[in-house]
Image (tube, rainbow, N blue to C red):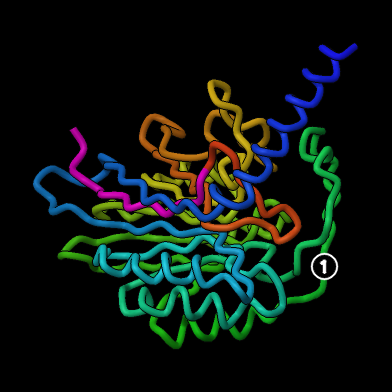
Amino acid sequence: MRTALTVSAAVGGLGLAAAGYAWGVERKAFRLRRVEVPVLPAGAPDLRILHVSDLHATSGQEWKVAWVRRLVELEPDLVCDTGDNLGGPDGVPAAIEALEPLLTRPGVFVPGSNDWFSPRPKNPARYLLPDDGRRIHGDPLPWGDLRNAFTDGGWLDLTHRRTTLSLHGLTVEIAGVSDAHHHADHYERVAGTVDSEADVSIGLSHSPEPRVLDAFAADGFRLLLSGHTHGGQLRVPGIGALVTNCGLDRRRARGLSRWSHATWLHVSAGLGTSPYAPVRFACPPEATLLTLVPAD
């Protein structure tokens, strides 16, 4: 009996230690990932794309704001923000403070559902079950205020928009859709084959739902950027993400992978968490600097 109690206490102690680490340490242990993506024509100059996502900003997160502000020191050629910038109704000032230095760089963005609605408490077990299509919305968020701050700063809102940018003398065709996890994507508004004169093409969707990724790839987009998954948020070492909270397979929950023969997908594990689940384990918060280089 004494042995059983000792083992039980040890297991409980390890669980508490892991929870304490996930809340007190890892959710604040920001990482900058650096990856190369071979999508440019031969002889083209490299392009540096900073991918940020899932900031989930609220007041009282000075540690997060300070780290994100320093990302401007990377001097990216383009910033791509794939949504869920807000964590609650008080999140707009914190999000603007965090991202304000990056507004001095060329940038584009699409929203996620947590830019429109506050998160609500949910049973974590739901994430382990098949998606039944139900969506639980909280109170409306001041998305218009944040959107206006982004556009006033010079970033382009790519919600159902397709445009062309010139970066380092290269023609970049870029398009975005609204949150596909909430069936707000309406890809038909940006559909069409990529211009043959474009040097590279990029598609943005907050949630990496396969139907949207397939549509971008079929039109010839070479690089797709998404967030939403939080990389699984709680990963098991040696196994990886247990869930993605969307239709994407678990092995693509974060990082760079091939979506098709000619299309790459990058999924950001994100910079924050829901205020109702402020923990990360084996999945630190991150931003990614993608260097686009000539393909073989």
Identified by mark 1, the residue type is Gly
Horizontal and vertical percent for residue 173?
A: 35, 60
Question: Is label 1 in a helix, a strand or a loop?
Answer: loop
Q: Is residue 294 left or right of residue 76?
A: left
Q: Is residue 6 above or below residue 166?
A: above
Q: Is residue 156 left or right of residue 148?
A: left
Count of marks, rendered view: 1
Of 16 and 95, which appears nearest the observer?
16
Q: Is residue 288 left or right of residue 250?
A: left
Figure quadrant of the C terminus: top left
Magenta residue check for 288: yes
Horizontal and vertical percent for residue 273?
A: 63, 56
Horizontal and vertical percent for residue 89?
A: 71, 78
Q: Is residue 29 above or below residue 58?
A: above
* Residue span colored magenta: 284-296
Horizontal and vertical percent for residue 186?
A: 64, 59
Of 9 and 62, which appears nearest the observer?
9
Q: Is residue 208 above or below residue 59?
A: above
Q: Is residue 126 at all visible to an observer of this figure?
A: yes
Magenta residue check for 196: no
Figure quadrant of the N terminus: top right
Main secondary structure along the magenta-highlighted residues: strand
| Residue at (24% x, 67% y) in the render | 75
| Residue at (29% x, 52% y) in the render | 200
| Residue at (82% x, 63% y) in the render | 137
Q: Is residue 14 left or right of residue 135?
A: left
* Residue carrying label 1: 138
Q: Is residue 211 at all visible to an observer of this figure?
A: no
Q: Which of the 4 image quadrants contains residue 250?
A: top right
